[in-house]
Image (spheres, rainbow, N blue to C red):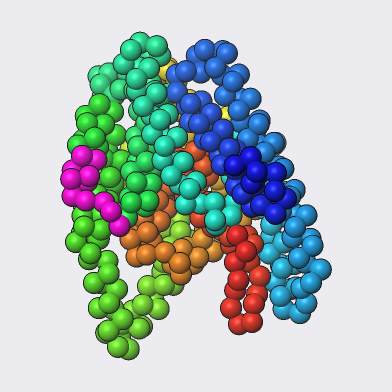
Amino acid sequence: MEQRWRNGGNDTDRMQILFQAAFVLYTSATCLQTTMYTRYAALFRIFSYMRYLAFALLTVLILFDIRKDLRKAKSLRGRAGFSYCKYSLLFVLAGIAASVVSFKTGDRTPLFAAAFLFAGKRKYLENTFRIAFAVLGGCIALAVFGSMTGVIPDLLIKREDIPIRHSLGFTYPSVCTAYFFFLLLLYLWIYEDTVCQKDLLWIQAVNVLLYILTDTRIVFLLGSAVLLAAFFFCCKGAGKRWTRRVRKAGRIGGLLYKMGTVLYDYFVVILFFIYALWCRRDQLSGGNSILDRILSGRLGLTVSAVKKYGIHLFAEKIAWVGFGGTEDTDALLGAYNFVDCSYAYILLSYGVVLFLLVMIYLVFLQKYIRKRESVWRCLLMLVILSYCLLEPRLLEIQANCFLLLGAPVLRVRRKGKGMEYHG
């Protein structure tokens, strides 16, 4: 390893080690910052320093890539040169927008998400996903163990005036279940070809146990649905059979496939449009719709936030008030204004510009995944985008590292009639 590090011809190996080091530092520190370990001032400072170090490593990687790209750009001509300039411009605009938003709002999440995307490459991702699985699982275990042994408190949150929702060492019950849900998706992504029925049963048992302890319905229902789908797609091979049948269906199958690809690529746009219509309908019904009650008031909170804070072109610093970090939720009930929908949260907090950049990126991400990944992995991405409609986890790399899958899209140039990815 030392010899490989010293060898100037192995820049890729060195950059991969730096990227993975930054990823471990950031994800572990940010994940632990959402636990009650932050009650210890020394640990809180250590977590902050870990994030600073991660950003420094990412900056080194980005500067190194810029130097290499500038050398390549000199040899590009015609359409290839135009394509390079177009994507480079989008690259720069996204970086500026994320930086401005982060410093104006005080929320560094967009800045870190942009830094990981700009520094990431396709060849890093498979190992990175395995690292993410280990880090996320370790942080969950550390928080749960700390709450069980009394090192950190296990906050009990009320459900209908009864304190029955365990936070399991995290600042709120839904934080723990959100991490578990992404851990589940990581497992099904990594071990797509080797997952068996026994594994799915064990995971469902943990899912049921978490539901009993945290009383978080969304993760329980979505997790159960994903595990059921995994049983048919992975264990029974239904995904491959379905794909073969569509391809053999002639013109009708071809037409359905083309319609399906369009719907898949623009799924996130359609999803947010439907959510906006739901919010409008909830507003017309006086905030008492059946769907809003099923979603625990999420539609009403979004409508209230839009009325109170408005939608701005650029970032707007909003004092969001949630229930995290305390058992006395009654004291915060009157001031509670947090918007759980990731897309609405980005639009309200980060502004229209960054919101549009995120939506454009997600469309490119969907196209990229559809062309390169299996049917099962494509379905997992739909689950992730749907889940982020109900939880604010879209840009949180410590949980949703799937966002990094589109990093090669930022290194694309035209080659002949097709596109060549340089990530």
Position of residue 208 in the picture relative to residue 314 (left or right): left
Toward which corner of the image does residue 73 lie, by quadrant? bottom right
Above or below: residue 107 compared with residue 169? below
Closer to the camera in the image, 95 or 196: 196
**Number of on-image labels:** 0
Query: Residue at 37% across / 64% down in the picture?
Result: 374
For the question of whether residue 118 can be seen, the reply is no
- Position of the N terminus by quadrant: top right
Above or below: residue 141 compared with residue 182? above
Position of residue 216 in the picture relative to residue 99 (left or right): left
**Magenta portion: prevailing SS class:** helix
Q: Residue furthest bottom?
A: 251
Q: Residue furthest right?
A: 74
Q: Position of residue 395 (x, y in %)?
A: 53, 44
Which residues are the magenta region?
A: 193-203
Above or below: residue 107 compared with residue 412? above
- Position of the C terminus by quadrant: bottom right
Q: Position of residue 393 (x, y in %)?
A: 46, 42
Q: Position of residue 247 (x, y in %)?
A: 31, 81
Query: Residue at 65% across / 43% down in the picture?
Result: 3
Query: Residue at 34% across / 23% down in the picture?
Result: 144
For the question of whether residue 143 can be seen, the reply is yes
Query: Residue at 37% across / 52% down in the picture?
Result: 189
Q: Position of residue 259 (x, y in %)?
A: 39, 76
Above or below: residue 262 compared with residue 272? below
Toward which corner of the image does residue 212 lie, by quadrant? top left
Position of residue 212 in the picture relative to residue 259 (left or right): left
